[in-house]
Each structure stands twice: as C-alpha cells, then as structure tokens.
Image (cartoon, rainbow, N blue to C red):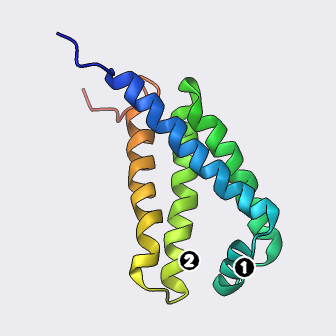
Amino acid sequence: MTTGVSTRTGGQILRVLIALFVLVAAGMKFAGTAFEVSGFQRFGYPLWFMYAVGALQVVGALLLAMRGTAALGAALLAVIMLGAVGSHLRAGDPVTMAIPALILLVVLAGIAVLRRPAGRGVRRAA
C-alpha cells in the first residue's frame, strides 16, 4: 500500500523549502535591508559580519538542497541558527524573538543527523 508522497520525497521538499527560506534571508542581508542592518547593529556586530553570514547562508542552502551534501549544509545552517538564538538572548530580546531560529536549529540538526553519510555514526566497542 502506498501513502502518496514518500518519506524521501517529503524530506527533499522540506530541505528545498528551508533552502529557499534561507536564500531569501541571505538576500535580505546582501540587500542591506533596514531590518537586517538594525538587527546586526543591535547585536553589536560589524556590518561586514552581516554579509559574511549571508554568504554562509547561501553556501549552506545550496549544500542542503543537494542529496549528497544535505547533512553538511544542515550542520552549517544549524550553527548559524545557534548563533542567531544566542545573539537574540545576549541582546536581551524577548525569548519569543529567538523561537523561529530555535525551531529551525532543531529541524536542521535533525536533518544533519538523519542525512549523515552511512558509516559515520558513533563507533561502538567490540
């Protein structure tokens, strides 16, 4: 019996949607939108760091969208989201402002673990 969209296809769709979302966020950084500039200023980061994060987001999104490199892309983006959560909390923002980044962090960490190459798991003693 088939259930319609397979788990593999569903996972691919999720990865592509997250990649598109991240590419939009990177585009906002490269465009220097007032929202992004004010956020990085509020966090106390120099403006060049906003562009560096945007570049890493592009790399991570492209890696995430491809099957063979999805785990690496998810891990890179998870680290960026960890930084986003930490930045919001360190800046004294309400916790609710960090929740979207936290949710994305958890999803990306899950993808990184589930999509890691075979044979790269935890080694067990014989």
Is residue 75 toward the left or the right of residue 113 in the image? right
The quadrant the C terminus occupies is top left
Q: Residue at x 43, y 85 (%)?
A: 94
Q: Residue at x 38, y 54 (%)?
A: 106
Is residue 49 toward the left or the right of residue 102 in the image? right
> Amino acid under label 2?
Ser
Residue situated furthest bottom in the rendering = 92
Q: Residue at x 32, y 25 (%)?
A: 7
In the rendered image of this protein, does residue 96 appear above or below residue 84?
below
Q: Tell me if residue 116 can be seen.
A: no
The quadrant the N terminus occupies is top left
* Residue 101 in the image, given as x and y percentages of width and height: 47, 64
* Residue 9 in the image, given as x and y percentages of width and height: 41, 23
Q: Nearer the viewer, residue 42 or 109?
A: 42
* Residue 65 in the image, given as x and y percentages of width and height: 58, 33
Residue at image mark 1: 45
Q: Residues within 10 Å of mark 2 (few under 14, many from 20)?
A: some
Residue 16's quadrant in the figure? Answer: top right
> Amino acid under label 1?
Tyr
Name the mark on residue 87. 2
Q: Nearer the viewer, residue 122 or 17?
A: 17
